[in-house]
Image: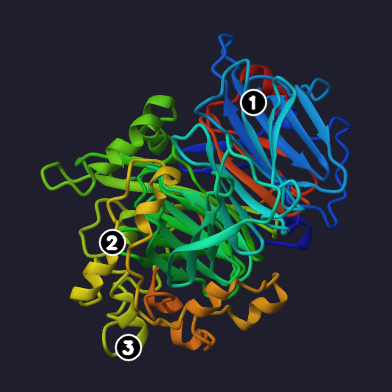
Amino acid sequence: MAAEGGGKEMNEIKTQFTTREGVYKLLTHSEYSRPNRVPFNSQGSNPVKVSFVNVNDQSGNGDRICFNVGRELYFYIYKGVRKAADLSKPIDKRIYKGTQPTCHDFNHLTATAESVSLLVGFSAGQVQLIDPIKKETSKLFNEERLIDKSRVTCVKWVPGSEGLFLVAHSSGSMYLYNVEHACGTAAPHYQLLKQGDGYAVHTCKSKSTRNPLLRWTVGEGALNEFAFSPDGKFLACVSQDGFLRVFNFDAVELHGTMKSYFGGLLCVCWSPDGKYIVAGGEDDLVTVWSFLDCRVIARGHGHKSWVSVVSFDHYTTSVEESDHTEFSGSDEEFQDQIHFGRDRANSTQSRLSKRNSTDGRPVSVTYRFGSVGQDTQLCLWDLTEDILFPHLPLSRTRTHTNVMNATSPPPTGSGNGGSVAGSLSATLPRSNSLPHSAAGGANSKVGGGGTDSAVASGVSKFATLSLHERKERHHEKDHKRNHSMGHISSKSSDKLNLLTKTKADPAKTLGTTLCPRMEDVPLLEPLICKKIAHERLTVLIFLEDCIVTACQEGFICTWARPGKVVSSCVETQR
């Protein structure tokens, strides 16, 4: 939905945009970058990434921002919409030689005004644990690159843990580390723990406990990103082979899968209540997948190139009780219905959980999510009732939702890709379109409840579980298109033994529950689709009073939400 008219208007970079809740404005004085504010020459460098943490200090200005640009890593006080950024005074700045930071993550559980734990992944495979407040470097993991030599693509603390973290690499492997353990002086030896469709998990064989605690080998090609569910029990992974794979993290069990329309998947995120997953990638689409039904429920088309980041807006996701308000009035009337604020955000997840309860009144819900891409465009999307519950009476109307085919996806039982549908019955026991089988019910529930203990301490009890015996062919190897799009690494002998030799035929997955045809699922149109940068966009983060974006030139932009522009910043917009 680009602006109509000549090329000049098409290429104009927007500094504000309007949605039903009001006007979002770019705060030029709240822009963060390298201190010299010179655009970074991004050729051949890793994507700019941004991490936030709140240190809960007494001043009321506890937000901190970390971002990487080329070989440099910066740590600032983040003033957001309140005050202009002061780039002359970084709390910490680091310049690396021989390797570049690729990703980072704060431990929100342990953060204080005096100390924060920041994990930083690097292009040569190492992971560093630093404290940018104390300006300390406490530990370096995979220092000799004995565990994995490939680029770190994603690093995250395990939710609720002070010491466990997960690292993904472009080799297609993920590793679970404990900050208290050493990595050893020799390459690790592994013992198979569990394997299944397109994945294998190994423990580290060692006389003394060492890192990594676990090695996950997932799919073919790079593992581009992973995300933990809001409750921390499930893990969604997207890979260069085009597959989304969702695991029960503690039980090391595959919950469900989805295949991109074509090409690799690059990014993934969860809805605030954990009921939906959105993925984006090289098919230029955003795909909405139901965690409960294990199926694609919608696709969104608005980008003109690869989608690099998807993210849900917890603060705009709205839940209304049974008054069934029709939002057909003016923008001002609609704005009265929307409230930004901590109370609303904190209660969103609990209110969403009421939606499917049988004893409560009907609840109307709209999920807001956003995406940015290599086309330099920001898209915002609303996921509404008519998409989530196509068989229920609509309690509201949405003019921006373009449903190509309002009917539910066609049944994919015995007649439509029988081998795939049959094999899927094990991972999709709740799908309305698939028959329930005894084997499917048993397999899908192995370890389904999860465990509360740490994976490291409970890992041995999974060693005796029987392996899945299904022989599925749709996960084996990636799409032909992918051979020029990413590094396809060789896998371990265990992985090769697991996978059959036949290549996954895209024609076999297209039209199945794994990858429905375009006409078989609703097609969303974006609420807004705006060009907001000169270079490809690499960051999209929704905060309480603003949206944060970043591009490969190294500029981190703050967009004030409607009504959140502080008076001192208003002059900068005129």
Q: Which residue is mark 1?
A: 64
Which residue is painted at 30% across and 69% down in the image?
428
Is residue 555 visible to the viewer in this orientation of the structure? no
The amino acid type found where label 3 is placed reads Gly
Indicate the secondary structure of the residue bearing disc 1: strand
Q: Nearer the viewer, residue 167 or 15?
A: 167
Query: Relative to 358, is 171 above or below?
Result: below
Colour logic = rainbow
Q: Residue furthest front?
A: 207
The amino acid type found where label 2 is placed reads Val
Looking at the rendered structure, the number of numbered marks drawn on it comes to 3
Q: Could you say which quadrant of the image residue 550 lies in? A: top right
Which residue is painted at 39% across and 34% down in the image?
338
Expressed as whole percent of the image width and height from the top left, the position of residue 355 reads 24, 46
Q: Residues within 10 Å of mark 3 (few under 14, many from 20)?
A: some
Report the side of 128 relative to 260 (left or right). Answer: right
Whichever of callouts 2 and 3 sits on the residue coming sooner in the sequence is 3
Question: How far is disc 3 from disc 1 in space, using C-alphas?
Answer: 52 Å
Question: How far is disc 2 from disc 1 in space, using C-alphas?
Answer: 41 Å
> Which quadrant does the N terminus fall into?
bottom right
Query: Relative to 232, is 189 above or below?
Result: below
Q: Which residue is mark 3?
A: 418
Which residue is painted at 76% across and 56% down in the image?
11
Indicate the secondary structure of the residue bearing disc 3: helix
Q: Which residue is mark 2?
A: 446
Question: How far is disc 2 from disc 3 in space, using C-alphas?
Answer: 24 Å
The amino acid type found where label 1 is placed reads Arg
Indicate the secondary structure of the residue bearing disc 2: loop
Report the side of 248 relative to 183 (left or right). Answer: left
Whichever of callouts 3 and 1 sits on the residue coming sooner in the sequence is 1
Whichever of callouts 2 and 1 sits on the residue coming sooner in the sequence is 1
